[in-house]
Image (cartoon, coloured by chain):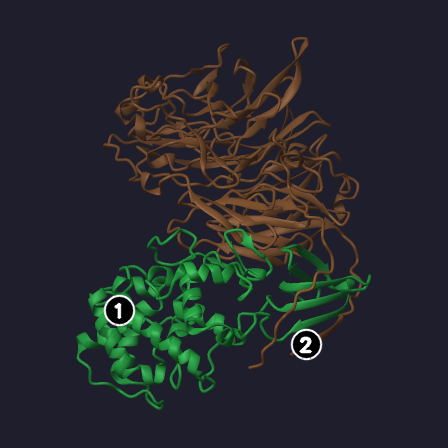
Chain colours: A green, B brown
Amino acid sequence: MFIPGTFYITAVKLIIIVSIMRAVAVLLLAVPLLAQHGAYLNESKNPAIGNPASIALGAKLFATSCAACHGPDGSGGRGPNLVRRAVWHPLSDEMIFSTIRNGVPGADMPPTKLEDDQTWNLVAFIHALTGPASENKVPGDAAAGESLFWGSKTGCSNCHSIRGRGSRMGPDLTNIGSQPLAVIKDALLFTSRRLTLAGKEGVTVTMKNGGVIKGIARNRSNYALQVVDAKGELHLISMDDVKELIVLDHSPMPNDYGTRLSAGEVRDLLAYLAHQTVRGSQIASNGARNQ
Amino acid sequence: MKSTLFVITLFCVCANAQVRYEDILKGASRNWLTYAGTYQGSRYSPLKQITPENAGSLVSKWVYHVPNANGLRTSPIVYNGVMYVTNSNSVYALDARSGRLVWQYVDTRSKKGGVNRGAAILGNSVYFTTTDNYLTALDRQTGALLFSKQFADAEKGITSTSAPLIVKDKVIVGSAGGDSGMRGFIAALSATTGEEVWRTFTVPAKGEPGAESWGDLVEWGGGGTWLSGTYDPALNTLFWTTGNPWPDFNGTPRKGTNLYSCSLIALDLDTGKMKWYFQFTPHDTHDWDAQSWPVLIDIPWHGQTRKVVLHANRNGFFYMLDRTNGEFLRATQLIDNVTWASGIDDQGRPVELPGKEPNADGNWVCPSVKGATNWMGQSYNPGTGLLYLLTLEQCGMYTSSSQKPVPMKNFGGGGATEEGGQVFLRAMDPKTGKRVWEYPMTGSGRMWTGVVSTAANILFSGDDDGHMIALDARDGKHLWHFNMGEGLTASPITYEVDGKQYVAIASATAIFSFGLFEPMKPMATPKVVVQH
């Protein structure tokens, strides 16, 4: 989960963030009414929620009033990551509204004196920010991103698959576009910060019979282990048969994409990933999740 | 942050085992590859480790609580030590030895809830359908999505609940929703893309032959196909049952026999063309869907071997037809209390008794709306030559309403309640159509459990009181039971991993797997090295 104070911005990332932010501000105009997460958005009654004009106004306000602490794209900084927060611990619109209005007593978040409608525009923008990437227009050239994804420069497909193509060892990305763009970007650039590794550790298993299996654990207990290797083959292992188990304490995903790729390439790759959904770009209240 | 590149080196090139059509064709083995275990619908396994002699040593080996489950209907699929179970819009792959989750796939885009009866498997793919009619294919080892393609419009009252049946390169899917008006169909979809190969409707369109057996509501007539069917490879024919006509309890707006509701239909696998049909309950007004297994066997009949299909119907009768042409051969009474018909004539038509239609005040008729049996899996055991199934002796009050039927408003044209009743697991002899033995149960008449039987002359089922049970298949003698702690609404299977036989079943909320007791040896935790 997000740990306040550990965030830093590299020059490369700043460029990306700014460019994405610029695009987000413009392109969120296309956010569909229901392009939102879960129940809390469906409960929204304020007309600003899901209204493209309100979202655009909210985006402007966010850039000038909130981005300094919460990051230009809401991914956090001095203040919390709003995108992640919405994924893991969703707040109601009314709660977001009241937080903006009253601030957080005892913390750095100050109260504001925005008008009601301005505040609702901000809430609407924060809402849209948490919507699936596939339902927002994103900057970048998806076709160029496609070449990158399947090419050797990134090596993405050595571990990941999309619609049955690629390696099945790592998480399937067929539906990655159901995640907010900022979450996908975060997973790409700051892999080791992802703490969704439980059951997905990189493992090297030395069996008592001398065999060695390397891959990603899908499930691990003291008694049993299930591993998918680079060929996508599943191994069902009893711990009774294991001599030694090496477990990575971080994601096996390379964490140098911020430097390996140019800002433009990252943007293109993200554009391609943002397009990946189970049911095309259909509007829905939530995306399928595949674990 | 430290930059670490995890370099994958391959140690072994594993044999890329795949499920082939030929494997499914062979029937149940160590694996359980299709809903009923065999294309004949027999839920029969050649496994012999668990016997009537050692069944007393059966213990629960593991339990997996399916998230958000309530009234699971899933029949597990097992291949190479991995079990696949479904809940509404979701699939779970479990280590079949330990019950540990390997992967899960949850489709949250489908807004509808509803039951799901299970998955299917072919090649490296596991298939299931969502409540809004998407056939979804997943990598069997990782759960990675291969495709998800819609085959019917949920806005037209159609939903999907049955396990797909895979034959050759086709995934056969059905349709549910007939109790609120829809047009039933069976469709064959490509196993590689989900594209439609053919679709055969169970209710004719206006102007088509058979439409004269309906009124104006023919295109909402129902005839759901919400249970998987069976397949005869020699005849290249699918056998599928169809559901009730709509509105369920009010026959007035649909004068006629209402083809092809409450029927068994035989379809050519390649084209979907209907070869023949047999309607068990013409113009049904008691919600007696024909959803009960069409079990395929070959038996001696009047001096020659006949290819027959056995069918125990909700309407209270046990039928035998020639499956090459649909010819009616015999019907006997499945349950003792049948009050709507005095029998079945030599053409296979019910001899209906007067005054048994639902009416405004309520009419007491046997069997009840749940039927003499229902969709639960039946088992035909070639060793004993008997068919095993759960039956319900129950009557109920049927009422009809003259309110105007409105499609998709869930208006059944009346209603039905049932009272009391008792469930019996019965062994029927297909040669005579008669009951050989029965196992009476206590409980509230819910009766939603199927049967599996094996070459060791043992059968497994669930009773009406929340117990998993094992009986001697020869005489119905009790061998073993286990209190599952909640009602059972699914059918058991059996499989083998690492030389050990298991029996698995879904309870209302969990998957249980049983095996013979073995004292557990202390397990030394291996050396675990955390690499930074």
Q: Position of residue B472 (x, y in %)?
A: 72, 35
Is residue B531 or residue A84 the one in the foreground? B531
Q: Position of residue B209 (x, y in %)?
A: 35, 17
Give the SS element for disc 1: helix
Q: Is residue B193 left or right of residue B39?
A: left
Distance between the Cα atoms at labels 1 and 2? 46 Å
Q: Is residue B399 left or right of residue A269?
A: left
Instruction: Report the amino acid beneath label 2.
Output: Val
Q: Are marks 1 and 2 on the same chain?
A: no
Q: Which mark is residue B530?
A: 2
Image quarter of the C terminus of chain B: bottom right
Q: Position of residue A134 (x, y in %)?
A: 37, 60
Q: Position of residue B213 (x, y in %)?
A: 33, 18
Mark closer to the observer (1, 2): 1
> For the view shown, which residue lies furthest in the right direction?
A209
Image quarter of the N terminus of chain B: bottom right
**In this figure, which residue is indicated by the disc labeled 1?**
A26
- Residue A231, by quadrant, is bottom right
